[in-house]
Image (cartoon, helix red, strand yellow):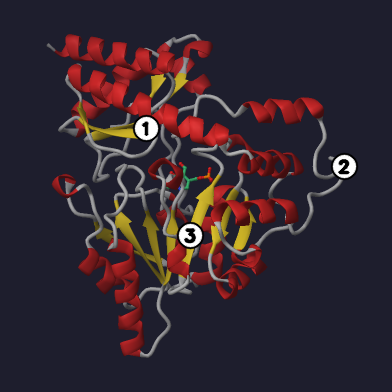
Amino acid sequence: MSPTPVTFGLPTQPASYTWEATDEEVAARYGVPIDEILRFDLNTSPQPPALAARILAEGEFEAPLSEYPPSDYRRLVETAARVYGVGTDELLVGAGADEILDLVGKAFLPAGGRAVVPIPTYAMYRVITEQRGATMIAVPRLGRADDYRLDLPATRAAAADADLVWLCSPNNPTGLPEPDGAIAELLDGVAADADAAGRAPAIVLLDEAYAEFVGRSLLDLRFEHPNLVIARTASKAYALAGLRVGFAVARQETIERIAPYRPPGSVSTVSVTVVNAALDEPSAMAANVARVEAERTRLTDALRAAGWDVGPTVTNFLLIDFGTPARAAETATGMLRRGLVPRTFGEGHPLAHCLRLTIRDRAGDDRLIAAAREIEGERR
Ligand SMILES: Cc1ncc(COP(=O)(O)O)c(C=O)c1O
């Protein structure tokens, strides 16, 4: 049982994303002062880059706030294309990676179609698939001993009659990237099978929301694979989740198939201006990645010393294995009583025995470490 209020999907309602309890709900339910609540469930960064406050204070945006943002987001597209090393016609702006995923679903997943989802992974792939009226073909990833890697033969086989394959590397919530060459091998296999069957290959959406933390990207695979779409975001390493800016990168002809689904002005002028500056001045992002790296080692070591089974990760979150769903739920309750909000996985989820926790800053992580020691102490 999840210790936080969750939204259960009814068969008559569309599939929907499930959030953890809000700060207000946690405060009310556990009697914790609201300003003491710290969120470990969202994989965000504790602080936005200083340039955000500077630009907001100056109040000079790309266009007057009385107007809509530029319809082509031209300056942002130019900056992002330069930063990612792609052409301006190979990139599309969306309201976060989430809107990119939604647009890809609209463009490539017809009602009655099929989408491959290697599980466990980011929940939105299933939500979007089901909201499109398509069928999710769930392909279990390998187990923990194999770093939850993709089951390449099974994923390839499932892709043979699919419209879309959702990939995520580094994978949320398991924390590691696919090994070198694995996704290229899968794309080659999907292309060969489609060729042999005389059909177009499935579109492969590769979600690289956490790519900056691992320092490499598979963007170059688009040259060989026009069916590849890569999603990137300003939410994670750039620490600007509240601005809601993400990107799709693919070959021009593929971007042209997604673009008609783009809503007018879903990304605000403020967001366009600040993210443009953040991409243009990547030192703050690099410092955030370095900070996460140092904190990741410190937090992992301290939680392991407290008795928690922390898995390997290259990202800004940890996956912690508590052995049983009951023990994970008990730990989540222990954290919530202390005002710390974990990401839980509901009953029946393949990771119901785990919690996912964001790496925050030193002070926040110290509260988590203290909580882990106390919770383990109480269990003895
Ligand atoms: C794998 C993955 N993709 C996409 C998102 C959403 O990113 P955005 O904030 O850019 O919509 C998240 C957020 O947690 C994520 O973990």
Instruction: Tell me which amino acid carries mark 2.
Output: Ser
Q: Which residue is mark 2?
A: 66
Nearer-N-terminus badge (2/1): 2
Name the image quarter holding the C terminus. top left
Q: Is residue 213 left or right of residue 189?
A: right
Instruction: Tell me which amino acid carries mark 3.
Output: Ile
Q: Which residue is mark 3?
A: 230
Residue at image coords 58%, 51%? 83
Instruction: Tell me which amino acid carries mark 1.
Output: Arg
Residue at image coords 53%, 66%? 250
Q: Secondary structure at mark 2?
A: loop
Is residue 37 visible to us here?
yes
Residue 343 tag number: 1
* Disc 2 residue crowd, few under 14, some 14–19, many 20+, Cα 10 Å: few
Seen from the viewer's position, the closer of residues 273 and 43 is 273
Q: Secondary structure at mark 3?
A: strand
Q: Give how far apart the Cα atoms at labels 1 and 3 are.
A: 25 Å
Name the image quarter holding the N terminus. top left
Can you tell which of label 2 and label 1 is closer to the viewer?
2
Q: Where is residue 51 drawn, in percent x and y?
A: 67, 30
Q: Secondary structure at mark 1?
A: loop
Seen from the viewer's position, the closer of residues 324 and 148 is 148
